[in-house]
Amino acid sequence: MAEPKKLFIKTYGCQMNVYDSERMSEALGASGYVTTARAEDADMILLNTCHIREKAAEKVYSELGRFKRLKAANPDLKIGVAGCVAQAEGEEIMRRQPMVDLVVGPQTYHRLPAMEAAVRQGHRAVDTDFPEEDKFEHLPKAPRAGRGPTAFLTVQEGCDKFCAFCVVPYTRGAEVSRPVTRILSEAEDLVARGVREITLLGQNVNAYHGEGSDGVWSLARLIRELAKLDGLARIRFTTSHPNDMDDDLIEAHGDEPKLMPYLHLPVQSGSDRILKAMNRKHTAEQYLKLIERLRTARPDLLLSGDFIVGFPGESEQDFEDTLSLVRAVGYGQAYSFKYSARPGTPAAEREGVADDVASERLYRLQALLSDQQRAAQDSMVGREVSVLLEKPGRLPGQKVGKSEYLHAVHVADQNLNIGDIARLRITESGPNSLAGEPI
Ligand code: SAH
Ligand code: SF4
Ligand code: F3S
């Protein structure tokens, strides 16, 4: 039998790209590829890229530059670019980097086997369509092998919100929800393979409105149905838009025990003026009211968010409104970014904030957010948590996993196994993780 061809995939960007990379390796698995962790061994290198900020997009080109040497050593090596940079730039990538053989967007990677075959014939292949057919229905069934205890599952993709700064509606396309039955069968399959925690993914996951047995289902209804799966212990979802947080989903945080008490709910800014300029379609006050309702439903809910500083037109007062909102919410975790002008988005036409001003604001915001994160983590000491053990730790016998609140926790106990959900008492709060001991 011929030696299997080797595929090296490198993934940038969000969790959905992680999910897509798995699907792409399954698709190429059907063409005889096995994955390798070493680019040097590969017959095919795929970069699954992110276009969200300029830095993310530029990384792709510096990475490609590094593969030149590998291609010189192995003329049969094929190089492909997938993901959101592929969608945004298409053939332009091949003009800038002639050694690229294949460009495939996020909605057409079910066509990878045919593209790979064409590339092996010496052609170059570009496909950045938004096809009629559903790619998930045209992908090979995953091999029923065992896997780690956590998994992502895409339930919704694309976005119709058109925030003024964001490329996602252009790179991922219009908002589409997968039908309920498909999601349930994928979830059942994951559970059969040992998965105990599923994170439902969507660029706007709480706008989910998939076709169910009796009409359209909301995300809350989908979560309640998934929660009936024996063997599935935990459900999470990301990322949500504040305007799509409906009553049922808020209540589910209070009454669905398998739904974890952690919510990533980006607000971007605390200034109404900037929120309006961003086209977020809600005010700071409305966001704070929403947080209050969520905390009434689930008092220990740990909140996470995303922030952009230096958006065009942001004044010192606007920025201070963001700091006030952060103080009012108290985030357990958050991501913050300096605004990056993206070609084709409405905000890219507007005059930006000076870079040194934006940098200084980012620094102040990050200092506040990291204080809050530190306080939230330290406050866990002495408390009892449930930790889903995901992998071995650095020390012998040690295992690492995540608490309900998504804090990394490590524990040393020979009787615990990967995949167990351990009841632990937190004994220590380190720089990036907590330490626990069995109760
Ligand atoms: N709703 C999406 C958001 C994707 S982008 C999701 O499912 O994840 C993730 C975050 O990147 C955004 O919340 C925003 O804070 C940040 N971001 C998006 N576009 C940006 C830009 N042009 N400059 C800086 N940050 C940006
Ligand atoms: Fe981008 Fe806004 Fe859509 Fe999120 S909601 S993906 S930030 S356009
Ligand atoms: Fe990046 Fe595309 Fe995700 S731009 S954040 S990889 S949807």
Image (spheres, rainbow, N blue to C red):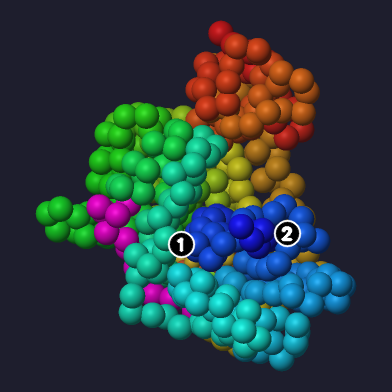
**Residue toward you, 137 or 123:** 123
Number of the front mark, 1 or 2: 1
Q: Is residue 388 above or below residue 335?
A: above
Question: Which disc number belongs to residue 340?
Answer: none
Figure quadrant of residue 167 = bottom right
Q: Secondary structure at mark 1?
A: loop
Identified by mark 2, the residue type is Leu
Q: In the rendered image, which quarter is residue 214 located in?
A: bottom left
The residue sitting at the front extreme is: 1
Mark positioned earlier in the residue sequence (1 or 2): 1
Say if residue 370 shows up in the picture: yes
Percent of width and height locating residue 71 = 81, 75
The residue at 77%/74% (across/down) is 64
Rendered view: 150 above or below 383? below
Q: Is residue 74 above or below residue 235?
A: below
Q: Is disc 1's CB within 8 Å of ligand 1?
A: yes
Residue 177 place in picture, x, y as percent: 32, 63
What residue is pinned by disc 1? 203
Q: Measuring 46% from the left and 30% from the top, which residue is drawn there?
A: 300
At label 1, the amino acid type is: Gln
Q: Residue at left 45%, top 70%?
A: 110
What residue would you read off at disc 2? Answer: 362
Q: In whole angstroms, how far apart are the C-alphas of marks 1 and 2?
A: 24 Å
Q: Is residue 227 magenta?
A: no
Span highlighted in magenta in the image: 170-183
Which residue sits at x=71%, y=18%? Answer: 397
Residue 391 location (% of width, % of height)? 64, 31
Q: In the image, is residue 174 part of the stretch drawn in magenta?
A: yes
Crowd class of label 1 (few under 14; some 14 to 19; many from 20; radius 10 Å)? many
- 357 left or right of 180? right
Whether residue 146 is situated above or below residue 71 in the rendered picture: above
